[in-house]
Image (cartoon, rainbow, N blue to C red):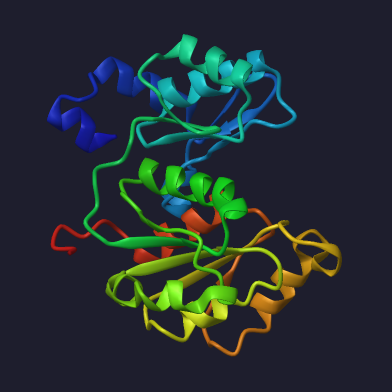
Amino acid sequence: MLFDVASGRVDPDQAVRRLQRLPFADVGLARIDHHRALRQGLPEAVYGPGKTAEDVAVVVAELLDGGTGPIVLSRADKAQVEAALAVDATGTVLGRTAVWRRAPVRGERVLVVTAGTADAPIADECAAVLWAHGIDADRLADVGVSGLHRLLADVDRVQDADAVVVVAGMEGALASVVGGLTGAPVVAVPTSVGYGASLDGVTALLGMLASCASGLTVVGIDNGFGAACAVVRQLGPRRADAR
């Protein structure tokens, strides 16, 4: 905030109002954590399910007025997005994710890989959250292990990435394969896609946790948001000299 005041992006009166809200603001339905970015490097996000459109609008308005970092509204329905955009129309809608105040663009190359087309919604969520944090993720779709030649045809893209997110359902084997092809951080996202013994993603989750490719980061089932946040944490502060 001090840098924003010094650069003229935030006027002193607005800065005082924001300081008065620290470390959190009680808006009745929620206590907005304005210090989260200082502690974690990632600001508080807004999770749509379980909230009314009016609730979402109140929380987004407080985050816009009381902070400076990117704001992410995830898994929002149409009414929630419309209510939030009525507060501030500058938001960018990416599928079921809406973003305000995108972070400065980073140079790292992040690849989001999906096993099948049914995994795309989770990959979309991941890519949208990465975008909010300044990362333009590349995508590699429909390269599951039942057609391994599809992945091998683009193995250079996997090996050139600074971080890779693997989104896969069924048995989740793609994460181990990718983890064996690159030394970059690999974040695995099990999805609930699959038949019978896939157990709504539990089989993929356990397979990823038991991977023989050491050092995989595994997030919860269908958690594209969490995968993006893991990548941002692993990459660390934005590097001006990143590729």
In this rendering, the answer to whether 217 lies above or below 223 is below
Q: The N terminus is located in which quarter?
A: top left
Lateral position of residue 6 relative to residue 43, left or right: left
Find residue 8 and report its horizontal and vertical position in percent.
15, 24
Find residue 37 and report its horizontal and vertical position in percent.
43, 45
Q: Residue furthest top?
A: 86
Quadrant of the rendered structure where residue 81 is? top right
Which residue is painted at 17% across and 64% down in the image?
A: 243
Q: How many marks?
A: 0
In this rendering, the answer to whether 178 lies above or below 62 is below
Quadrant of the rendered structure where residue 213 is? bottom right
Quadrant of the rendered structure where residue 189 is? bottom right
Find residue 108 and report its horizontal and vertical position in percent.
26, 61
Find residue 122 and report its horizontal and vertical position in percent.
58, 50
Which residue is painted at 13% across and 63% down in the image?
A: 241
Which residue is painted at 13% across and 31% down in the image?
A: 7
Q: Nearer the viewer, residue 68 or 75?
A: 75
In this rendering, the answer to whether 213 lies above or below 27 is below
Which residue is painted at 34% across and 61% down in the image?
A: 110
